[in-house]
Amino acid sequence: MTDTATAVRAAEPAGAVTAPVVDVVVPVYNEERDLGPCVRRLREFLDRSFPFTARITIADNASTDSTLQVAAHLARELAGVRVVHLDRKGRGRALRQVWLDSDAQVVAYMDVDLSTDLNALLPLVAPLVSGHSDVAIGTRLASSSRVVRGHKREFISRCYNLILRTSLQAKFSDAQCGFKAMRAPVARVVLPLVEDGEWFFDTELLVLAERIGLRIHEVPVDWIDDPDSRVDIVDTARKDLLGIWRVGRALAAGRLPINELRAAVGREPLVEGVPLGMVGQLVRFGIVGVASTLAYLLLYLLLQSFTGAQAANFLALLITAVGNTAANRAFTFGVRGATRAVSHQLQGLAIFGVGLLLTSGSLFALHHWAPNASIHLELLVLIAANLLATLTRFVGLRWVFRQADNRATAVTR
């Protein structure tokens, strides 16, 4: 069903309207009392402390009180404020429509109660404006977050995120924090696939984003819970569990076009049958490792009769190490582009040195104890040594590429 929406904008001189860098959406339903103070405080913060051009969009989804009138008055009073009215209720429904229609580079949203400290807004959107990340979320569950809320809500939040981790293998820490942002081009690709129009919208969006390989940036936030929240916890929990069941079944049955979405946002397609996470990395690393080992053995056989065992081992291992690092960089660990590619190769060669010690040491030991060993015995010893070297290589490369990702993240903070 298509929602209808109407927009109310503040009057501005002709030619003065330009697309903002960030569009901050405030979804509201019957918030006639809190809306004015919230929008004025947010507008003042954006004007005084925010380095990017920003618009506030009040998304009124079918309020039955005077919220729409209050919002229209704010749009006329304050520059850079507009109102979009939807005829159907639902936070997710409002966010999907406003985000899809926005002309900003980055679309964001925050709850009308401003539970999140506004100083977290710049760390939230900066990695998206720079292009480093695709999605950004506030998290109340990080060790450095400062949260004031009741034990009941804290317990429910942690249990919910535990359920997501075990059932949908989610890696993000806080699905329901009302403080999120997304690059608009990515939003236009992903949002049409998000079915939920209410509170599960956030979770479904993040699960899809994670599965298609989008980079999710998490920002620890200072959060003070609103004691006047109108959220029905029991009904929301029931709908969230139904949403988890629906998305889990869709993923298991292959009904979601994950590979098509990955291609649309510039990520490589998933290998059929290969899971995500560390297990998936091990499987992909194994695929690369088998190909590298076969290439290594072929090169060794070709070179051994000309150069001798040690030189053939060195050259075969060196050549395959360069190809192995490049393949694992892109295929196993999903690192793309030329940034730090040379550095990664140098680090890969350092790890190659460990493998060289293992394989050369095994050859030295073999020739010391069995100087007349056949080529077949040499190959068996080298295969065993290469298995140990491969394990060392996986641990080393995983550290290299995780360190690279951590350094890139730190630059944008």
Image: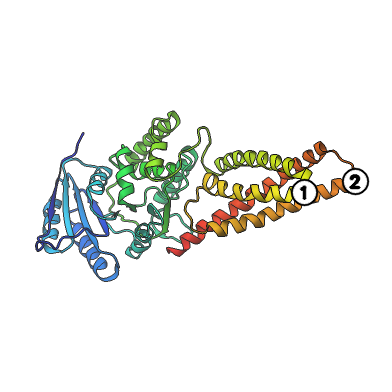
- Quarter location, residue 56: bottom left
Residue 273 visible? The answer is: yes
Q: Amino acid at mark 2?
A: Trp
Q: Where in the figure is residue 14, as x and y percent of width and height?
A: 9, 61
Q: Where in the figure is residue 66, as x and y percent of width and height?
A: 12, 51
Mark 1 secondary-structure assignment: helix
Q: Are marks 2 and 1 in contact (CB under 8 Å)?
A: no
Q: Which is nearer the eye, 344 or 254?
A: 344
The quadrant of the picture occupied by the C terminus is bottom left
Residue at the farthest top position: 253
Q: Amino acid at mark 1?
A: Thr
Q: Which is nearer the eye, 305 or 235?
A: 305
Q: Is residue 318 left or right of residue 335?
A: right
Q: Residue at x 38, y 53 (%)?
A: 137
Mark 2 secondary-structure assignment: helix
Q: Is residue 413 left or right of residue 375?
A: left
Q: Residue at x 60, y 52 (%)?
A: 397
How has the structure been colored for display?
Answer: rainbow
Q: Residues within 10 Å of mark 1 (few under 14, many from 20)?
A: few
Q: Which residue is mark 1?
A: 307
